[in-house]
Image: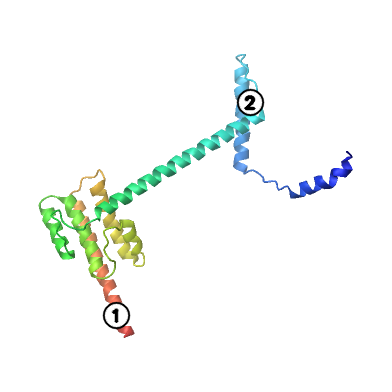
């Protein structure tokens, strides 16, 4: 077959070929591997040890491909571990806010939870006292129509729902994080933790009141 007869077909294939230049980082890594293999080959040769194909450029490509596979596998494992930890955290958060009641099963409002936290703190049970402060905050938000309490909500969902009131959201997140730390973590709750939870509770109470007044004023202005 004459070359001139197939030239149009070759030209058409060449026009449709889209060469993708490999990333510079991969090119540098491959070049570094090739250099390392040459150095390794020279070192082995000094001991009269010869490894066929060690300096072949295809060897560096193969090693690089294996490295990329290992990196992909590692990333997948890390992703699965992060996902597992996140699901575990959400489960713990749900358990924390599941009932919103005392150990006796009695449902409490915001004021009663505040009194309960003071009683628990006086008894030296700072872990339960911090948790009671947390529930008092949730009830405040619910009673002032800012955020409805739901046993199935996680702390992240509460925080996300408060996103429009940044100061309130920040204070709630700090309180929730503190309670999670002493409730599920290895940290032993102490008086300082309780005092911090009460301080955050007071800030949430003040901020929620300010938001409630703003909402009332807005409604009055419309009417």
Query: Image quadrant for the C terminus?
Result: bottom left
Asked if labels 1 and 2 touch by Cβ distance under 8 angstroms, the answer is no
Q: Mark 2 or mark 1: which comes first in sequence? A: 2
Which residue is at a point 77% across and 46% down the rendered structure image? 13
Q: Which mark is residue 217?
A: 1
User: On the picture, is 109 further left or further right than 223?
Assistant: left
- Depth check: give the residue in front, 158 or 8: 8
Q: Gap in Å between the C-alphas at discs 2 and 1?
A: 79 Å
User: On the picture, is 1 further left or further right than 42?
Assistant: right
Asked if residue 209 is positioned above or below residue 220 in the image, the reply reads above
The picture places residue 84, in percent across and down from the top left corner, at 37, 45
The picture places residue 11, in percent across and down from the top left corner, at 81, 47
- Depth check: give the residue in front, 46 or 223: 223
The nearer-to-camera label among 2 and 1 is 1
Q: Which residue is mark 2?
A: 38
Element type at mark 1: helix
Which residue is at a point 19% across and 52% down the rendered structure image? 192
Residue 187 sits in which quadrant? top left
The picture places residue 173, in percent across and down from the top left corner, at 30, 58
User: On the picture, is 50 further left or further right than 105?
Assistant: right
Q: Which mark is residue 54?
A: none
Asked if residue 190 is positioned above or below residue 46 in the image, the reply reads below
Which residue is at a point 17% across and 52% down the rendered structure image? 128
Element type at mark 2: helix
Residue 60 sits in which quadrant? top right
User: On the picture, is 58 further left or further right than 188?
Assistant: right
Which residue is at a point 58% across and 34% down the rendered structure image? 64
Outermost residue on the top side: it is 48
The picture places residue 188, in percent across and down from the top left corner, at 21, 45
Q: How is the image coloured?
A: rainbow
């Amino acid at each position: 077959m004459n070359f001139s007869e197939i030239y149009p077909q070759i030209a058409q294939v060449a026009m449709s070929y889209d060469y993708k230049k490999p990333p510079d980082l991969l090119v540098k890594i491959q070049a570094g591997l090739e250099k390392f293999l040459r150095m390794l080959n020279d070192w082995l040769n000094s001991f009269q040890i010869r490894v066929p194909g060690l300096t072949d450029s295809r060897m560096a490509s193969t090693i690089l491909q294996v490295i990329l596979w290992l990196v992909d596998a590692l990333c997948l494992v890390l992703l699965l571990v992060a996902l597992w930890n996140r699901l575990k955290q959400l489960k713990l958060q749900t358990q924390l806010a599941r009932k919103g009641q005392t150990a006796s099963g009695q449902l409490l409002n915001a004021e009663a939870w505040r009194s309960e936290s003071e009683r628990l703190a006086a008894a030296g049970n700072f872990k339960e006292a911090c948790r009671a402060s947390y529930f008092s905050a949730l009830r405040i938000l619910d009673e002032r129509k800012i955020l409805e309490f739901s046993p199935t909500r996680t702390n992240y969902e509460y925080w996300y729902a408060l996103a429009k009131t940044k100061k309130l959201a920040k204070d709630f997140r700090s309180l929730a994080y503190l309670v999670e730390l002493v409730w599920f973590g290895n940290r032993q709750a102490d008086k300082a933790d309780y005092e911090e939870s009460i301080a955050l509770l007071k800030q949430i109470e003040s901020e929620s009141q300010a938001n409630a007044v703003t909402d009332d004023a807005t409604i009055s202005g419309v009417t």
